[in-house]
Amino acid sequence: MLAHLAVVVGLLSLFAVLVAATPPDAGANIGAGIIGLPLLAVGMPWSLPILVDPYRYDQWSDAAHYLLWFGPALLNVALHAVAIAVWNRRHS
């Protein structure tokens, strides 16, 4: 579980640094996009709506986009922690 958390937090931190370091008028941030792809995969199945139709959410704010894209990865970390806690409680 700690490895799962470390991967997600590490990728989110790297994504945040890349987004913050790139000026808004610089165009597409390919580096941040490459970091974002594994975060979408780690968030499956909850990140499926953004993968199926990403343009549906164009009118949303940037903060809402980031939450929709990367919130599922954090949700899976939380669900993983709960599953381990339940497993340990039942088998100890």
Image: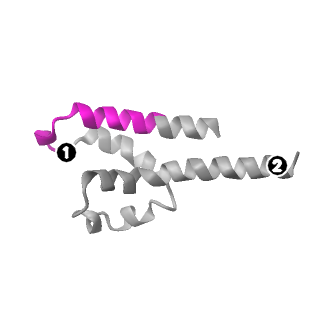
Q: How far apart are marks 2 and 1 (CA)?
A: 47 Å
Residue at the location (35% across, 38% down)?
A: 15
User: Is 44 in the magenta?
Assistant: no
Q: Is residue 27 left or right of residue 82?
A: left
Q: Could you say which is closer to the camera, residue 8 or residue 88?
A: 88
Residue at the location (32% across, 56% down)?
A: 64
Q: In this view, does 41 lie to the left or right of 88?
A: left
Is residue 76 positioned above or below 17 on the image? below
Whether residue 40 is visible to the viewer of this picture, yes or no, is no
Residue 39: x %, y % from top left: 44, 47
Whether residue 1 is visible to the viewer of this picture, yes or no, is yes
Residue at the location (59% across, 49% down)?
A: 78
Q: How many labels does the image show?
A: 2
What residue sits right under mark 2 in the picture?
Answer: 89
Q: How crowded is mark 1: few (under 14 residues within 10 Å), some or many (20 or more)?
A: few
What residue sits right under mark 1 in the picture?
Answer: 28
Magenta stretch mostly in which secondary structure?
Answer: helix
Q: Which of marks 2 and 1 is nearer the N terminus?
A: 1
User: Is 13 in the magenta?
Assistant: yes
Q: Give the range drawn in magenta.
A: 10-27
